[in-house]
Amino acid sequence: MNWYSNAIFYELYLRAYADGNGDGHGDFAGLRQKLDYLQWLGVDCIWLLPYYPSPLRDDGYDIASFFGINPTFGFLEDFRITVEEIHRRGMRIIADMVVNHTSDQHPWFIEARRSKDSATRDYYVWSPNDDLYREARIIFLDTETSNWAYDEHTGEYYWHRFYRSQPDLNYDNPKVRAAMLEIVQFWMDMGLDGFRVDAVPYLFEREGTNCENLPETHGFLRELRQVVDERYPGAVLLGEANQWPQDLIPYFGDDDEFHMCFHFPVMPRLYMALARQDRSSVVDILEQTPPIPPNAQWATFLRNHDELTLEMVTEEDRQFMWEYYAPDPKQRLNLGIRRRLAPLMENDQRKIELMHSMLFTLPGVPVLYYGDEIGMGDNVELFDRNGVRTPMQWTPGENAGFSQTHPSNLYAPVINDPIYGYKTVNVLNQQAARDSLLHRVRQMISTRKSLPILAQGRLEWLDELPPEALCFWRTTVGERFLALHNLSDEPFDLYLPPGYTYTDTFNPEADPIDHTITLPAYGYRWLMAE
Ligand code: GLC
């Protein structure tokens, strides 16, 4: 089995995690101090948000140089030592690679906008007018009104799928493609175990299409995979393509594009199922998901550093989700919800655990988002997605133990409200309390890892059950695992499929369970059947 199939991924934003040098911004030195924690939690692979030099107008997804480290985060040497320390603990590390665009502060773009015949003009996508590619949607709907921005100096428009400060690279230019492959190799040679490849559907543009998922884009991704497979066997490429299942499948290729892709459509449906106390949205989307190549894996998640995207749901379901989970317009952003997991679950530990249980038992490799393991809150007063990127809450002490600086120097205020504030919600307190969310998540992680059937098993639904029961088998030759979830706020009795004896995987010493089980409100059970 591939290492990633049974791994637990953990996404973290360096700036938000731990400040090692006391300037109010997290950094590599801070992260190194927290590696013991990540190992204790059971994390196998850290995914780092971009750490490259950047004006941080999109938190580093606007790269100004591909070959360095943002000085607030440390130096190249820091990076190298951190990677070494991670490997020494038996963990791995992947990093974001932003392939679609650069910052407008990147020397390529600075040079490109100098004149129409500058050496790097053709690294970007220019047009004398803004008529082309009208069918391409605007992604940052709340900020941008067009995918074209006018450049006064040269009197032409340049193409950007995200902020106007992030000009799209021109993948029709072979120099751009070659440069990107070189960048990838530079970082792999520095010790990375792979990449989360950002915003992949948008690499090429073609008139008369929506400029997403084009065959040319897949062609480049196959080239990328080939370089990685040939030179760095065992590395993983994880694709960020926010698409419907039928458009996602081609990103695995024939086991020759991504090793892993995020399953974007299933994520909002886990929330929908819970809100409606009805499993059908989850069942439907997984039934519509075609099989993937033998070495491929889905990456699944509950939350990440972006808004909880509602792009991959129907208009009706989006309205439902907004009304249910983001009643205050401030909680909405673009086509999504800018809140964290715990507040979405009204801080009800039963519901937070239930969501994790679904994440850990359904097919896919779980990707956790920093802070969700302790139930951190969010701050909608902060701009854009910053409210879900606040400092990690380590202790009830000053600055939540994140930094020793004066609070006014923090890159963002720590969450400090009575419910989710760092005085209550922090790692230290939860490590001390045996029944805390943190301990429960840690237990689920270690149990999941002891059950390879959860990485490989086939999914079979138990469908003769009331709608609030989300129950399924995972099966391999000779083994059966049964996951039971109660999506409702009322307990119910369940008759287990006959012919087996069941062992509770969280409590294997307890007496085997026979026929009936009572699932409390929002309860869940993980059973091995024999
Ligand atoms: C991806 C990232 C997001 C970023 C965007 C542009 O969607 O997840 O944070 O803003 O790409 O790079």
Image: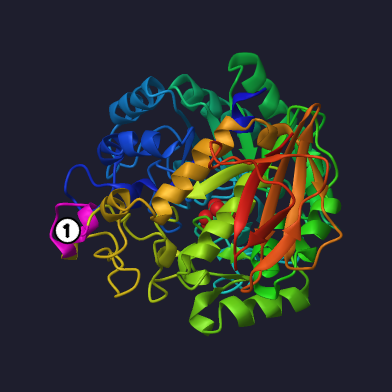
Q: Is residue 307 magenta?
A: no
- Residue under circle 1? 397
Where is ligand 1, by quadrant? bottom right
Q: Is mark 1 within 8 Å of ligand 1?
A: no
Question: Looking at the image, is 61 positioned above or below residue 93?
Answer: below
Task: Give the quadrant of residue 478.
Answer: top right
State whether residue 81 appears in this view: yes
Q: Is residue 68 above or below residue 520?
A: above
**Nearer to us in this view, 359 or 208:** 359
Front one among 462 and 268: 462
Residue 123 visible, this angle: no
The residue located at (52%, 70%) in the rendering is: 344
Q: Position of residue 307 (x, y in %)?
A: 55, 64
**Horizontal relation, residue 491 to residue 14: left or right:** right
Task: Please tell me whether mark 1 sits on a helix, a strand or a loop.
Answer: loop
| Residue 190 vertical position relative to residue 464 in the rendered view, above or below | above
Counting from the top left corner in percent of width and height, residue 426 is at: 30, 57
> Callout 1: few (<14), some (14-19), or many (20+) C-alpha neighbours within 10 Å?
some
* Residue extent of the magenta highlight: 396-407
Q: Is 264 rendered above or below residue 78? A: below
Closer to the camera, 90 or 235? 90
Amino acid of disc 1:
Gly
Q: Quadrant of residue 493?
A: bottom right
Give residue 286's position: percent from left, percent from top.
Answer: 80, 52
